[in-house]
Amino acid sequence: MRTLIHLSDLHFGKVDPAIIPGLLDFIRVTKPDLVAISGDLTQRARTAEFLEARKFLDAIPFPKIVVPGNHDVPLHNVFARLFHKLDHFRRYISEDLEPFYLDDEIAVAGVNTARALTGKNGRINRQQLAKLRARFATLLPAHIKIVVTHHPFDLPSGVEGDRVVFRARPAMKILAQIPIDMLLAGHFHVAGTSRTITRYKIDNYSALVVASGTTTSTRGRGQPNSLNVIQIERQRVKISQYRWRAERGAFDLFSTEEFVRTGNGWMPGMTGSRFQKPIRFSQNRLSPHGYAGLHLTVGVLVVLICGRCFGEIAEDVSHGDPIVQVATLFAFVMVGGSTLNVVLKHFFHRERPVLENPLVTLSNYGFPSGHTMGATLFYGFLALLAWKNVRNRAARLACAVGACFCILLVGLTRIYLGAHYLTDVLGRRLKHLHVVCFAPTALSAFAPTLRKGF
């Protein structure tokens, strides 16, 4: 059996210093046969950051395989980005951008997918695929063949869009011919395990796709810092995800998945206990980490409670309660605006700003701004409601000015936090003003009832 520790997206220059000692202790205790680091060792490819990364690597007393990521390519220095994009990586980390590790049981090949002209996205070319084919050609079928890249061939659960490595589909056909057993990557700071058969329908082929979250940086995206421990046997693989617990100063086991090799590729295996899966499911649903944990459980309970309340409200609506009618109209305005926001985000696919030190880091699309949408609809609706029902002209004007100020303030804070461009905010504000403008018509329709009710 072989044990491999998978780290990714260290981002020296933006690390949580409290994690480093605990991480090194974890590696020493685990005693892996190999440590694989799938890119983004630095935040902005600066010399000081590479020196910190080098010091960290020197403290790991086990074989390592390290590939660069897009953050290891200079961003602001255009000349260096185009003509010396990985010079610092070669100087401080490794001359070999595509290392190879081989023993009696596993073969691990690193592939450099970082490019100067693809932005955050990566690319794999024909020459790299030919090199992979040649490296694995002489190995026995019993060898577990692993490829390490920074950019993934499939997206971990919870990541939206289609931002896999460029040329992934033709590359997967060649990887299936080799055949590759496991693909390790990072990039999105979201951990998870899947199989290639989900995205790529290739006969009799199903490799494992293992994503690591950011192991040490402060740029989390809804998940705590994490790493993977992969225990490999000839016909079975066990993948354990460990997450950082700041209160303990250590990495704790979060989840475990097992897979077995069959004639059709890697398939989920049976666990040792008949109750392990439901127990793990319950633990995951009550975990405070991640969107599918306690957040989801509480969300489901809230939906059930709201559903019951909606039934009560619907009964009042059927009897003409004026306050409930206005509340129902308000709910439709907000839900309609939210739905439109999701549709537009997936239509435009606009990335969020890339700043040196953003106050918030989000992984979904930025245009148009959802927070500005909510503010425009909420305060705009309240202002219109006040305009229809407040008789004093000065009070009307004060309500309108106050609503405009709140909407403006929300938009400016989204720009200040680094979550949106100015056009994201303006686009969303203009788009949802037309939704608010339909509200006077609806309010006028309800006006006779409102006057009776109030």
Image (cartoon, rainbow, N blue to C red):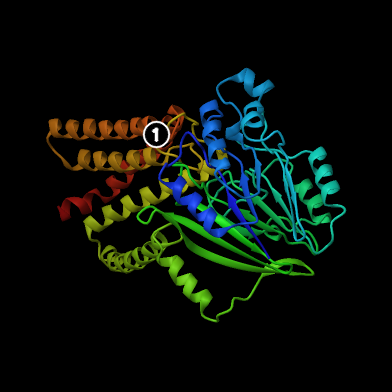
Q: Quadrant of residue 380?
A: top left
Residue positioned 83% across, 54% down in the render = 178
Using the image as rendered, state which of residue 102 and residue 38 is in the foreground.
102
Write down the residue under mark 1.
429
**Is residue 226 toward the left or the right of residue 360 in the image?**
right
Where does residue 78 sit, x and y in percent of width and height?
Answer: 61, 19
The type of residue carrying mark 1 is Arg
Query: Height in image: 260 above or below 48?
Result: below
Where does residue 147 sit, x and y in percent of width and height?
Answer: 72, 50
Where does residue 79 sit, x and y in percent of width and height?
Answer: 63, 18
**Is residue 342 toward the left or the right of residue 313 in the image?**
right
Quarter of the image that includes the N terminus: bottom right
Where does residue 386 sit, x and y in percent of width and height?
Answer: 20, 41
Using the image as rendered, state which of residue 265 and residue 85 is in the foreground.
85
- Structural crowding at the residue carrying mark 1, measured as other residues with C-alpha within 10 Å and reported as few (<14), some (14–19) or many (≥20): many
Q: Residue furthest right?
A: 138
**Is residue 161 toward the left or the right of residue 320 in the image?**
right
The secondary structure type at the circle numbered 1 is helix
Query: Height in image: 60 above or below 261?
Result: above
Looking at the image, can residue 288 be seen? yes
Residue positioned 22% across, 33% down in the render = 402
Looking at the image, can residue 222 be seen? no
Using the image as rendered, state which of residue 427 and residue 315 is in the foreground.
427
**Is residue 56 toward the left or the right of residue 326 in the image?**
right
